[in-house]
């Protein structure tokens, strides 16, 4: 009871502080990334101070989920959009069941020009539109981050999202990471192959060529016994999603992640070239939920493979409904940055079911 009350109080405080920071820092000029940078710096200070204990919530024992050889303490995991240790640590403390590093590319990339991330309203719901373009320091700079003791001490699965513009890039990044992981003591790593990138120029990656995807996953499997997740976009046609499921159903220790951000035009949500550098970007938020649920139902009725449901998941009701309709895990993004203290509250309600 006291932990629930603490979570509710912290939730109110977090939302107030977040909104205040956005109003003071990100409204003139309009650029949500300015608030994000400030928020990340503030969170870093909290995570190296004694105040971080305020964020710590235990996870009920009866909500664990086992997928292949991975054990997730909660069915809620983070989507692959952050790689700073302070954010990932915060989410571990509040009770996330597993984390996923944001997509790693072979070479460093600054991403698209700013402004490239903004708050929007879509279909009457709050959302975030981003055209970040996968900024990354590259795989060689990423490798030293992987074995961070602050994160691995929780002994919860850690996913590594891999991206690329060709089969060769995906495979090269994978080989470098796999070689590094084999030298570590921590074993609960898994791979996520990001085959659709709606905030890049063409909105697509490996999803254009599923035969190459099949070859890539088979070659991953020949090299590694780790769980492999394939992440598809809500923009992908049902036939394409089912073809990916067919490929994965014949390869051991694989998972489908139905969810990425949805590509929309910036001008449809009131953004102009002055406050959004690209013509469109990837939308995240509540409006994606109905399609996420529909896709989970479609896959679970046809294939017996684990499903991660990501996209618009923002409440206990969403999580519960997805789990009852075939999802093994639910991925969170927008809720983790807008109101992370909902996570322990959702965990407690799941435990009471």
Image (spheres, rainbow, N blue to C red):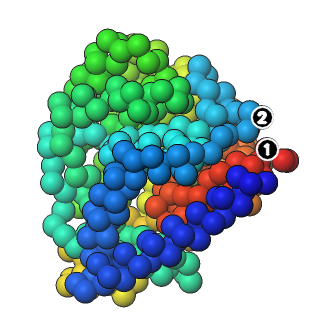
Place of residue 245 in the rendered image (x, y in percent of width and height, measured from the top left) = 56, 37
Q: Residue 62, which numbered label?
A: 2
Q: Is residue 115 visible?
A: yes
Look at 32% across and 12% down and name the residue there. Answer: 183
- Looking at the picture, tell me which residue is in the foreground, 295 or 136: 136
Q: Secondary structure at mark 1?
A: helix
Look at 62% across and 27% down and name the residue there. Answer: 71
Q: Is residue 309 above or below residue 184?
A: below
Place of residue 2 in the rendered image (x, y in percent of width and height, measured from the top left) = 74, 54
Q: Are marks 2 and 1 in contact (CB under 8 Å)?
A: yes
Identify the residue at the far front of this view: 50
Residue designated by label 1: 351
Circle 2 crowding by C-alpha within 10 Å: few under 14, some 14–19, many from 20: few
Look at 64% across and 34% down and name the residue there. Answer: 73
- Looking at the picture, tell me which residue is in the foreground, 283 or 136: 136
- Taking the image as shown, residue 259 lies to the left or right of residue 317, namely left
Place of residue 230 in the rendered image (x, y in percent of width and height, measured from the top left) = 46, 38
């Amino acid at each position: 009871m006291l932990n629930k009350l603490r979570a509710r109080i912290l939730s109110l405080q977090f939302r107030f502080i977040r909104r205040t920071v956005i109003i003071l820092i990100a409204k003139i000029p309009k650029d949500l990334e300015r608030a994000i940078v400030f928020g990340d710096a503030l969170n870093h200070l909290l995570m190296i101070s004694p105040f971080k204990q305020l964020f710590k919530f235990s996870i009920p024992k009866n909500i664990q989920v086992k997928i292949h050889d991975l054990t997730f303490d909660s069915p809620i995991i983070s989507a692959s959009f952050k790689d700073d240790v302070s954010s990932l640590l915060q989410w571990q403390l509040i009770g996330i069941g597993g984390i996923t590093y944001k997509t790693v590319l072979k070479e460093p990339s600054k991403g698209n020009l700013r402004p490239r991330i903004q708050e929007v309203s879509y279909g009457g719901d709050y959302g975030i539109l981003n055209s970040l373009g996968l900024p990354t320091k590259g795989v060689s700079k990423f490798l030293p981050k992987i074995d961070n003791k602050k994160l691995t001490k929780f002994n919860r699965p850690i996913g590594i999202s891999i991206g690329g513009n060709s089969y060769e890039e995906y495979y090269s990044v994978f080989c470098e990471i796999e070689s590094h992981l084999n030298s570590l003591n921590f074993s609960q790593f898994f791979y996520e192959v990001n085959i659709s990138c709606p905030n890049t120029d063409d909105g697509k990656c490996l999803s254009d060529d599923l035969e190459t995807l099949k070859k890539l996953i088979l070659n991953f499997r020949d090299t590694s016994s780790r769980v492999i997740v394939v992440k598809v976009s809500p923009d992908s046609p049902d036939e394409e999603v089912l073809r990916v499921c067919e490929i994965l159903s014949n390869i051991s220790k694989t998972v489908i992640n139905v969810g990425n951000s949805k590509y929309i035009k910036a001008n449809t949500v009131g953004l102009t070239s002055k406050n959004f550098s690209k013509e469109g970007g990837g939308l995240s938020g509540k409006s994606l939920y109905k399609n996420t649920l529909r896709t989970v139902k479609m896959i679970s009725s046809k294939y017996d493979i684990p499903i991660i449901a990501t996209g618009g998941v923002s409440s206990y009701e969403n999580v519960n409904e997805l789990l009852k309709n075939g999802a093994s895990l639910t991925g969170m993004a927008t809720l983790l940055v807008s109101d992370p203290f909902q996570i322990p509250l959702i965990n407690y309600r799941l435990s009471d079911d």
